[in-house]
Amino acid sequence: FLVKGGLVGGAVYVVYEQGLLSGSDQGAEALQKAQAALPPAVEEWTRYFGWQLPAIPKTEFSIASSWNTGVETVIGALSVAPTRACEYTQHSWKYLKGLIK
């Protein structure tokens, strides 16, 4: 339990120190640092263990744009949730009243 707690605490500390819990500018900067540092590290480990990995495909995919779209969708759904719940409740009561008559 203590080892798992230590790993989680260390992960949270690293995430906080890298700026991933702050604004989007610092998060984007941390992502660029990770993208620059990860391929050399993976290459070093594959040479060390003697593995051969396939080449990483280049994609033109914006994580920031997808993240923002996802956040907007979730917030939009949460903002209309009370209204939808009220509407569904009213429809349910009308349906049940119709069955009882």
Image: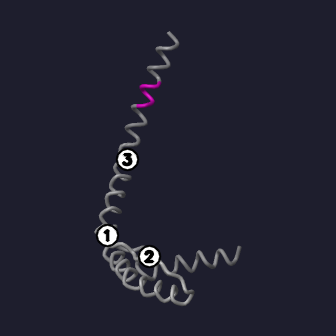
Q: Nearer the viewer, residue 44 or 65?
A: 44
Residue with the most extreme top position: 101
Location of residue 10 by image quarter: bottom right
Please tell me whether mark 3 sits on a helix, a strand or a loop: helix
For discs 3 and 2, the disc positioned in front in the rendered view: 2
Label 3 and label 2: CA atoms lie apart by: 40 Å
Q: Nearer the viewer, residue 84 or 11?
A: 11
Please tell me whether mark 2 sits on a helix, a strand or a loop: loop
The residue that appears at 47% across and 78% down in the rendered structure is 53
Name the mark on residue 98: none
Q: Is residue 78 above or below residue 27?
A: above
Q: Position of residue 60 (x, y in %)?
A: 28, 69
The residue that appears at 41% across and 34% down in the rendered structure is 86
Name the mark on residue 59: 1
Location of residue 57 by image quarter: bottom left
Residue type indicated by callout 3: Ala
Q: Position of residue 40 (x, y in %)?
A: 42, 87
Q: Is residue 29 above or below residue 73?
A: below
Which span is picked out in magenta? Answer: 88-92
Of marks 3 and 1, which one's residue comes earlier in the chain?
Answer: 1
Residue type indicated by callout 2: Pro
Q: Which residue is mark 2?
A: 54
Q: Residues within 10 Å of mark 3 (few under 14, many from 20)?
A: few
**Residues marked 2 and 1 touching at CB (< 8 Å):** no
The residue that appears at 43% across and 36% down in the rendered structure is 85
Q: Position of residue 91 (x, y in %)?
A: 42, 25
Q: Which residue is mark 3?
A: 77
Please tell me whether mark 1 sits on a helix, a strand or a loop: loop
Label 3 and label 1: CA atoms lie apart by: 30 Å
